[in-house]
Image (tube, helix red, strand yellow):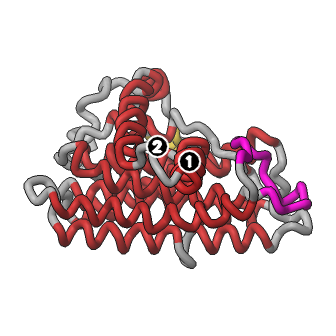
Amino acid sequence: MATCLSHFNHKANFLSKSKSSGKTNYKPRRIIAAAQNKSAYWASIDADIDTYLRKAIPINSPESVVGPMHHLIFAAPRTGAAALCVAACELVGGDRRQAMAAAAAVHLMHAAAYTHEHLPLMTTTEYRPEPEIEHKYGPNIELLIGDGLIPFGLDLLAGSFLDRTRNDPDRIVRVMVEITRAVGSQGTVDALYRKRGAIDGNYYDYQVMEYVCRKRDGELHGCGAACGAVLGGGAEEEVEKLRKFGVYAGIVRGLTAAADKKKNRGGDLEGNIEEMKELAMMELMELRGREIELISSHVFLAEPRLA
């Protein structure tokens, strides 16, 4: 552990044992201040992903298709999963460009799910999150364009096969599998189905909310981190450690939104958020010899998504 944390101030204790209970307690101390200085790193990744997407979908004809696609892709709120893909790739020694197509695909999957979740059709305000995007198009257009974002993301990944100097075809195929699994019936779709079934008002019961956050936010963030590690050439153990880190980091984002909105019913929400942060950091600290300072700031700079 000392080696893994050698890039931090040795006086900054991340984990310590409580004398009364023996339980590991999470004490961020100086890492919180250090994390605040890492926002520029994440901003640079987000900017690179935006640039990549804008080049991939230039505004041209047919405007009736490209216009709504462009709007919905960039109107959806950011998910940390896309940036985490790039950060994980760099952590294991890869080049940022190796993960750019995958990061863009992760954002597209998120944008598709977010569009479907916010279609202007529902009248039940308990279920519908407050929209963060302007509905410039009708629900029929948003539904169809949302569907189209998923194959478009896979098409971007398939196109990265052409750059054999940076990308391994076997790794790209694995990433495709990872992404489709994360947004399919085992991940995002499952979360939206479970949330849709909770329109009687019990979504904010902790058990339901935690399940939705794990499947929606946790799975996508875990997928992003794992994909980045795969593309960067990380060892299998590193891939799985980063996947677990991503899952915990994603859950933190989802639960933080509920905490901010004060809509949780049952469960120690703030305590569970801190526990998830602790578990996330423990996964990183087992990555021997890796510089975890930048990527660890993800759980401290997390901006909550709408619940």
> Which residue position holds label 1?
67
- Foreground of the two, 292 or 176: 176
In whole angstroms, how far apart are the C-alphas of marks 2 and 1?
7 Å
Q: Position of residue 261 (x, y in %)?
A: 79, 41
Element carrying mark 1? helix
> Which residue position holds label 2?
59
Residue 23 can be seen, yes or no: no
- Foreground of the two, 170 or 33: 170
Q: Which residues are magenta?
A: 120-136
Residue 181 can be seen, yes or no: yes
- Image mark count: 2
- Foreground of the two, 274 or 88: 88
Q: Are marks 2 and 1 in contact (CB under 8 Å)?
A: yes
Which image quadrant is residue 274 in?
top right
- Foreground of the two, 125 or 87: 125
Residue type marked 2: Ile
Secondary structure of the magenta portion, mostly?
loop
